[in-house]
Amino acid sequence: SWDFGDGTTGTGINPSHTYTSVNTFTATLTVADSEGLSDTTTIEIMVTEENGTLNNPELEDIKIYPNPVGDENLNINLSEFMNESISLGVYDYYGKLVFQNVIQKDHPEEIAIDVSFLSDGLYLIEITRIENNEFTYKKIIKGK
C-alpha cells in the first residue's frame, strides 16, 4: 500500500498521485507477502512549483537508450525540443539528486550523459521544459 504523506493513500503497482501544494512530503510504500512478511521504504518528495505539469505527452515521447545502461553513455533524444532549454536531473533510488545539467536552446538533437560514475541500480531521470515548467520522469537501470 502507498501513503503519499498528504493524507491520501493508494494501492497497486503503479499508482498515480497529484500533490496540490508546495511542501515536502514523505511517501511510504509497504509491501507484504502471503506469509505475513512485510517491508517498508520511504522517499521524500519536494514539491517546489504549484504550476508544473507532470507527464506531458510530448515529454513522454523522449527516447532514452540504452536501458539498461552499463558504463557507456546514456543517450537522450531531444529532437522535439530543439528551441527550448531543458533541465535534466538524475535521482537515485532514495531520491537523492546525483546529477544535474541544464541543456541550453539550440542543443544537439541527441545528448550523451556519462553515467559510468553511477553505481548499479534504479534511477529516475527528471526532464523539465524550463520555459513552461512541464516535466516527466523516466526510469533507467544502471548495470547489466
Image (cartoon, rainbow, N blue to C red):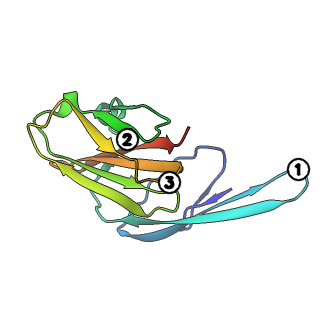
In the rendering, which numbered label is found on residue 119?
3
Q: Which of marks 2 and 3 is nearer the N terminus?
A: 2
Residue 54 drawn above or below residue 144: below
Which kind of residue does numbered mark 3 sit on? Ser
- Whether residue 1 sits left or right of residue 133 in the image: it is right
Is the N terminus in the top left, top right, bottom left or bottom right quadrant?
bottom right
Quarter-of-image position of residue 81: top left
The answer for how far apart the CA atoms under marks 3 and 1 are is 32 Å
Q: How many labels does the image show?
A: 3
Residue 136: x and y in percent read: 36, 44
Q: Residue at x 53, y 42 (%)?
A: 143
Is the C terminus in the top left, top right, bottom left or bottom right quadrant?
top right
Nearest the eye: 113 or 64: 113
The local secondary structure at tag 2 comes to: loop
Which residue lies under the disc numbered 2? 55
Q: Which of marks 3 and 1 is nearer the N terminus?
A: 1
Nearest to viewer (mark 3 / mark 1) = 3
The local secondary structure at tag 3 comes to: loop
Which kind of residue does numbered mark 2 sit on? Asn
Residue 95: x and y in percent read: 47, 61
Nearest the eye: 9 or 140: 140
Nearest to viewer (mark 2 / mark 3) = 3
The answer for how far apart the CA atoms under marks 2 and 3 are is 27 Å
Which residue lies under the disc numbered 1? 34
Nearest to viewer (mark 1 / mark 2) = 1
Q: Which residue is drawn at 13% across and 40% down?
A: 84
